[in-house]
Every structure is written in structure tokens, then in C-alpha cells.
Amino acid sequence: MDIFVEMIAVLKLLVIGLGAGLGLWGGINLLEGYGQDNPASKSQGVKQLIAGGGVAFIGIKIVPLLATLF
């Protein structure tokens, strides 16, 4: 059972890292869109920023609940 808890902790870190990376990439795209006055890049950046926050939220709130399933 101890290895299962460790796997959940690693999965949590991976999902949070993925969400943070996506959010950072979205922030860069958003700022680049403002710098070049490009509405398409701004839109894509906002979408990526929100998606990264959602993925990080899943890693923080939902993934630890997997430990209670078994």
C-alpha cells in the first residue's frame, strides 16, 4: 500500500507540473500577443493560461482523492 501512496504523490507532482508549464506557455503567448498587437495570439494565450490552471487544479484537488478509492 505504501508504493500506491508514493505513486499518487508522483502523479500529483507530474500533473501540477504539466499544468504549470501549460499556464506559463500561455502567459508567454498572451504577452507576445500584446507586444505584437495580435488578437489571435492573445486568444490562444488566454486559453492556454486557463487550461493550465485547470490542469493544476485537477492535480491539487482530484488526484489525491485517488488514494481513497482503494
Image (spheres, grey):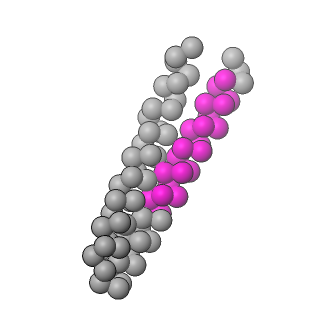
Residue 61 place in picture, x, y as percent: 44, 34
Report the magenta stretch's main SS: helix
User: Which residue appears at 64% of the width and 38% of the height?
Assistant: 10
Give the residue furthest to the top. 70
Q: Quadrant of the C terminus?
A: top right
> Is 40 included in the stretch rendered in magenta?
no
Number of numbered callouts drawn? 0
Residue 37 position (above or below residue 29): below
Q: Residue furthest bottom?
A: 36
Q: Residue at x 45, y 32 (%)?
A: 62
Side (left or right) of 25 relative to 37: right
The image quadrant that residue 32 belongs to is: bottom left
Name the image quarter holding the N terminus. top right
Residue 18 in percent (x, y) is at 54, 51
- 33 left or right of 67? left
Name the residue at 35% across, 66% down: 44
Which residue is at the far right? 3
Q: Nearer the viewer, residue 61 or 49?
A: 49
Image quadrant in which you'd find residue 31? bottom left
In-image side of 13 versus 56 (left or right): right
Q: Is residue 20 above or below residue 26?
A: above
| Residue 20 forms part of the magenta stretch | yes
**Placement of 21 over or under 4, stated as above or below:** below
Identify the residue at image location x=48%, y=58%.
Answer: 22
Q: Name the side, left or right, on which 60 lies relative to 34.
A: right
Which range is magenta? 4-24
Residue 67 at what x, y percent from top left? 56, 22
